[in-house]
Image: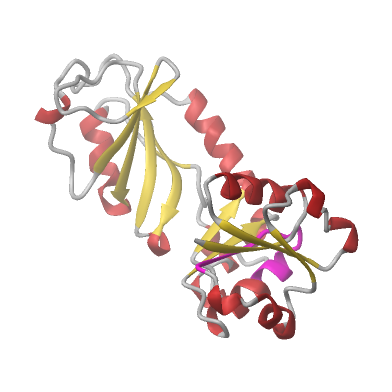
Amino acid sequence: MRVVIAGAGNVGRSIAAELVEKGHEILLIDRDPRAIKSDTLPQAEWLLADACELSSLEEAGIDTCDVAIAATGDDKANLVISLLCKTEFGVPRTVGRVNHPKNEWLFNEVWGVDVSVSTPRLMSALVEEAVTVGDLVRLMTFHEGESSLVEMTLPTSSPVAGTRIGDQTWPGDAVLVAIIRDGRTQAPDPDGSLEAGDELLFVTAQVDERELADVLSPREGGVVDASLAAPARMTQGL
């Protein structure tokens, strides 16, 4: 897979290093000469250019990329880059980094952003996930907000604790995708059992979250949105 990353700072380089290790073809773009550190990641391509300019994106061959990641420290730049990649070059998948939580509501399909990643929201999600037992925590949203990655630490009072995984029928189209037990991640085994203290990760439609919470923890369970916290209703922008 060919991936272009606009923004070769610490975040961009870290993403690039992970993707290179997984065998992907990476191009890093930055307009600051100080950010071009090709010796730190010689397996990647590097381009000194302004990714907000059409000519720079043409030079980079953006139309041949499968994914474009706008990872600069400037939300305005990330929106412009995402919009150009999506509308002018037809990049199939765009990912936009959100630096300021007040700007989250802008990072959507209108600006060409398929997936937005907000570091403050991810950090709050990790806090919620770490301290909340018996609540369903929304960690991330997919597909324009219709589906979510959610987590619950199963309380001892849960009616599904001690039951066989294969015997469970989850609400709607909810899918149990992983179980974290004793610090180790494992795939759900239909012949295995659910245990109190398990961290369960589901992909589910948001309309089914409340019912899923009731199945897992009917007396305690709530739904905590630790992902986007209603950014679309925010009125402050860039």
Q: Residue furthest front?
A: 43
Percent across and percent down for residue 148 are 37, 50
Q: Quadrant of residue 80?
A: bottom right
Q: Residue at x 32, y 45 (%)?
A: 203
Percent across and percent down for residue 223 are 38, 39
Q: From this view, report whether residue 217 is shown above or below residue 237.
A: above
The region drawn magenta spans: 66-79
User: Considering depth in this image, is 55 or 101 the residue closer to the camera?
Assistant: 55
User: Considering depth in this image, is 217 or 85 the residue closer to the camera?
Assistant: 85
Q: Quadrant of residue 58?
A: bottom right
User: Considering depth in this image, is 100 or 183 the residue closer to the camera?
Assistant: 183
Q: Is residue 238 visible?
A: no
Q: Residue at x 71, y 64 (%)?
A: 75
Q: Is residue 170 left or right of residue 150?
A: left
Residue 186: in magenta span = no
Residue 67: in magenta span = yes
Percent across and percent down for residue 170 are 18, 39
Percent across and percent down for residue 50 are 79, 74
Q: From this view, report whether residue 80 is shown above or below residue 232.
A: below
Q: Is residue 41 visible?
A: yes
Q: Residue at x 41, y 64 (%)?
A: 144
Q: Residue at x 66, y 73 (%)?
A: 81
Q: Is residue 211 left or right of residue 166?
A: right
